[in-house]
Every structure is written in structure tokens, then in C-alpha cells.
Amino acid sequence: MAKIKGNANTSTSSTTPKATSKAARPKLTVQARIAQRIERDMKSYGKLAKVLGRFDHEAAARARDCIGQLVNGMADAATSALEIPADAKPTRTTGGGTNAKPGVTVGALVTIRDKRKGEYDGLLTPEELAGLRVTAMRGKKLVCEVNGTKLFIPRGHVVVATAAAA
């Protein structure tokens, strides 16, 4: 009779999700995530203070004191972050550069910036350059239709002449 290795009743794969899976975890608010990041950074600065504690030097003592003040300030910041109401919305959105330009929407009338007009000299007439209507937006590019031809223009090349009618 041949010996069977292992236990026939055990399975190598689990069919039930773990309790720590992302689906089982409650979603944290932005405020709680900020507080967690601050607390995690506080721990790392605390480790730096321990390392500095090994040195018997005046500069190390000053650095340790500064880190102590920093950690105290960070503790205040963590508690302040948790005091922000959960339904509060940020007044500023993320993203910078040309992505943050207000007023560039579908239907807006845009013109090419003066410093970029040279790039479009042979492509469009001055009348067409003065009044481009945005028909769509594809990431950081604007789609403008001129005489039946779609033109993809970077947002940084244009200035809003008139906002789209709401």
C-alpha cells in the first residue's frame, strides 16, 4: 500500500476572504488618513530623537529638543485634522499647472496665447486663431473643430476668450 503524503482533508486555497481584506475594512475619512500619516511621521521622528540621545554633544541636544517641539506640533496637527467635519469639502482641488485653469470647458471660446501663435502660423488663419470653440476635452488637450477638422491643442497654449453658456 502506498503512503499518501499530506492530509487529504486540507485545502491549499481559501475560499472565504480574509477579515483584513480591503473589502472588509471600513473606508477611512480623509481627515483620519491625514491624522494617520502625521502619527506615522511622528513615530519616525521619535526614532531619530532616540538616535540623537546616544550622543553627548550640545548640538545633538539642541537637535533632540527641536525634534521634540516638532513632534508636539505634529500631535496638535493630528488632533486638529480629526476635528475637521466629515462633510467638509476642500475649497481647492488637487492638480496644478494647466490642469487647474478655470473656465476651460466644452463650448468655451478660446484664443491662442501670444507667445504660442508662431506655432500655429501656417496651420490657421488669424481669424480662426481668434475664435476657437472647444468641442471636447481629452486629458490636458482641448479638441477644437476648425472647418470640419479636429485640432488637438494643449491647454497651456490657450486663453479663455468667453466662457461656455450654461
Image: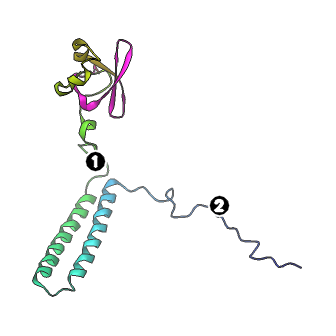
- What range is drawn magenta here? 136-164
Q: State the residue position of label 1.
A: 88
Residue 114 pos. (x, y %): 17, 24
Residue type, numbered disc 1:
Ala
* Label tally: 2
Given residues 36 and 104, the one toward you in this image is 104
Q: Nearer the viewer, residue 18 or 50?
A: 50
Quadrant for residue 164, please give it: top left
Q: Is residue 146 above or below residue 6?
A: above
Q: Nearer the viewer, mark 1 or mark 2?
A: 2
Q: Which kind of residue does numbered mark 2 sit on?
A: Thr
Residue 75 image position (x, y, % from top left): 23, 68
Residue 56 image position (x, y, % from top left): 15, 88
Main SS, magenta residues: strand
| 137 falls in the magenta region | yes
- Quarter of the image for the C terminus: give it: top left
- Residue 15 has which mark? 2
Q: Quadrant of the N terminus?
A: bottom right
Nearer to me, 94 or 17: 94
| C-alpha span from label 1 to label 2 | 40 Å
Label 2: which secondary element: loop
Q: Choose the circle earlier in sequence order: 1 or 2.
A: 2
Left or right? Give the position of 160 relative to 3: left
Q: Is residue 49 magenta?
A: no
Q: Secondary structure at mark 1?
A: loop
Apparent side of residue 21 relative to residue 129 in the rendered image (left or right) = right
Give the residue furthest to the bottom.
56
Label 2: few (<14), some (14–19) or many (≥20) C-alpha neighbours in 10 Å:
few
